[in-house]
Image (cartoon, grey):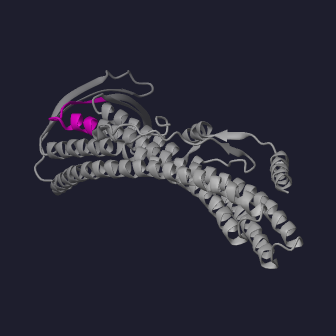
Amino acid sequence: MENHEFKTLKFCTLLLLCASPSAKALTWSEVKAKALETAPSIITGKAEVGSADAAIDRAKAEFLPSVSSSLSASRRIDSGEKTSSNTYDAGIALDQSLFSFGKTRAQLNAAKSGKQAALSELKLSSVTLRAKLAKAWSKVIYLQELAKLGEKNTVRREANLQIVKLRYQGGRENKGSVLRTEAAKLQTSTESEEAKANLESSKGELSVLIGQDIDRKEIFSGDIETRAPAIPELKNHPHLEALLAKQKQADATLVESRRKYFPDLSLSASANKSATPNLPLKDPIYQAEVTLKIPVFNPSTSADVSAALAKSKTTSIALAEASATQKQKALSTASAFSFARQKLEVARKIFEATKLQAEVSRQRYTLGMMSFQDWDSYESDLMRSEGEVLRAKYNLSDAHADYLEAIGIALEEGP
């Protein structure tokens, strides 16, 4: 009888595997590549960098001269003499700032710091996206494996049911044991279906993060490598780099605002030519002037300085606070990751022990040397402990994602 039941279990398992439809396996590396191309947060970050480049170009343009041209036509009518004449004018003008007491340079420095902040924000978006994407991926893998485990447990429960029925038919087991085993089979089947339903929802969450739909029929293959790199210099964390760049930008803006109290020296030059039909051409008129503009009173300048000074102070405080917070976060997530790894090892050892106990208890129950209640308890422990291994792997992946986010590992950098 024992050999017959084991053969039944193996046959059902093989049948289940053969019936599984073949599908393309989607890997973690492929998901990362998709996200780097189409994730909304990455696209937005790249657009911000492009905007910062344009701001630098505008600031550089202030060092260059501006050239403009003009064309005009006028008609003069003398009602007394009953005559009229047309006049045509053409001109070109050049304006050049000669000296602005550092205001233009401060504008350029602020624009450059703005670009550095945009680049750091882009990398920070990649760091945050990597953590979210890794958690979503791990959840999909967990639910996918949980659904498979539910199917395997259902097959095992069916084999157990056949054993109990044979003993019941032989008068060595009661009807309650049969009903109990049938209910346990239904429970594992329901858990498997629930995992499949949650899996579809999780694939949808992953699609939103990537920015493109994922084929729901695809199989997700491979766990994320959960190695623990040493805690790097946190001053290079993109969050801190972004705050530092914003502080430099605020300081440059403060310098620019204060320079508005100083004079501006500029040069302008122009050339104009006029012509009237039927009259000799007039000689061109050339003009050049140097202007010194001295500010006397402008209330908005004081307001700009006060706002820039407040911005500089707040960014400095935010940077100091973030540095302390980031260090604490790195330490706490490293500790959580270490304990998650230990818990996975414990779960695996417990599973190996319950697996051995389940094998022995099956043999003893088949030979009539163990009660149904004891055997059913060992079977439930086996299935529960295997599920705990999957849960511990999922928790380890989550802890690993949190740790890499805390130390600033971007999507294109980390495993």
> Which residue is located at x 76 percent, y 67 percent?
185
Quick one: 310 or 231, which is closer to the camera? 231
Residue at 17% across / 42% down in the picture? 255
Please provide the residue range marked out in magenta.
Answer: 94-110
**210 and 108: which is toward the camera:** 210
Residue 206: x and y, percent?
60, 51
- Outermost residue on the right side: it is 169
Q: Is 128 colored magenta in this rendering? A: no
Q: Front-most of 89 and 242?
A: 242
The residue sitting at 66% across, 56% down in the picture is 146
Residue 77 appears anywhere in the view: no
Is residue 361 left or right of 236 when viewed as pictured? right
* Side of 340 relative to 8 (left or right): left
Place of residue 294 in the rendered image (x, y in percent of width and height, measured from the top left): 11, 42
* Residue 388 in sight: yes
Query: Relative to 92, is 180 above or below?
Result: below
Q: Does the magenta segment cover residue 100?
A: yes
Residue 61 in the image, given as x and y percentages of width and height: 33, 32
Task: Say which of 265 and 268 sits in front.
Answer: 265
Instruction: Say above or below: 257 vs 33.
Output: below
**Where the N terminus falls, by quadrant?**
bottom right
Q: List x then y, in percent, for residue 93.
A: 32, 29
Q: Based on the displayed image, in which of its 4 quarters is residue 25 positioned? A: top right
Quarter of the image where one finds residue 81: top left
| Count of number-bearing discs | 0
- Viewed as shown, does residue 227 lie left or right of 139? left
